[in-house]
Image (spheres, rainbow, N blue to C red):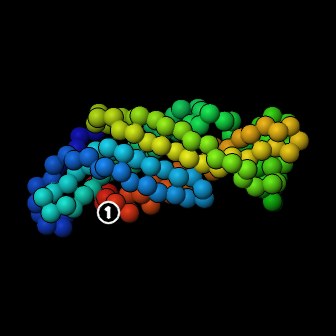
Amino acid sequence: MTPDTSPCRLCQGRMTLRDVDRIEGEEHGVHLCIQGMPSMACAQGHRRLVAPTFASEMLDTLLADPLLVPLEPAGRRGLLRKRFACPGCGAALDGGASGRVESHRTIAVGGEHAFDVQLEMPTFRCAACQRECVEPVDAVAADLMKASARAFRTAQLAVA
């Protein structure tokens, strides 16, 4: 991916590569913290993502790891009323979140330097077999996408 060095859309200033110190976002208990992420910035402090595809490539890189966190994802059961199901015994996980799990990754996206991503998400404990798990992969991916969008919006990072 080639960094988008076109002028700033707000002030027409020259954009250069600069790291974002720390940004955070959260959705449905999935907390995302990004440190040292490359971005484009002008002298006036306006920022944008390095390239239009940066956010999606970052999420693809994170989700490419089959075990994003050190726990298995739950399954889903039910046609009308969808419920989480234990990956071990298949019992419904009706009790709600029972704890939290953290994960840390250092990733590089699009040929830019590596940066740190910390994730924290709710865990669920099966009442039948006591196995601990996290939300199903599709739910985690959706929450992670929304959490990253909130983080970028909070840091006033525009899409390239």
What x and y, as percent, mark residue 100?
A: 64, 47
Q: Position of residue 58 (x, y in %)?
A: 41, 42
Quadrant (top left/top right/bottom left/bottom right) for the C terminus: bottom left
Which of 94/10 is in front?
94
Q: Is residue 133 above or below residue 40?
A: above
Residue at 36%, 45% (x, y): give it. 35
Residue ID for mark 1? 156
Q: Residue furthest front?
A: 99
Q: Is residue 137 visible?
A: yes
Place of residue 69 in the rendered image (x, y in percent of width and height, measured from the top left): 59, 37
Q: Nearer the viewer, residue 60 or 150?
A: 150
- Residue 7 in view here: no
How far across and how far down the image is residue 90, in percent? 84, 40
Secondary-structure class at tag 1: loop
User: Residue farthest to the right?
Assistant: 128
Indicate left or right for 47 with 94 as reference.
left
Kindly indicate the quadrant of the structure image that contains residue 107. top left
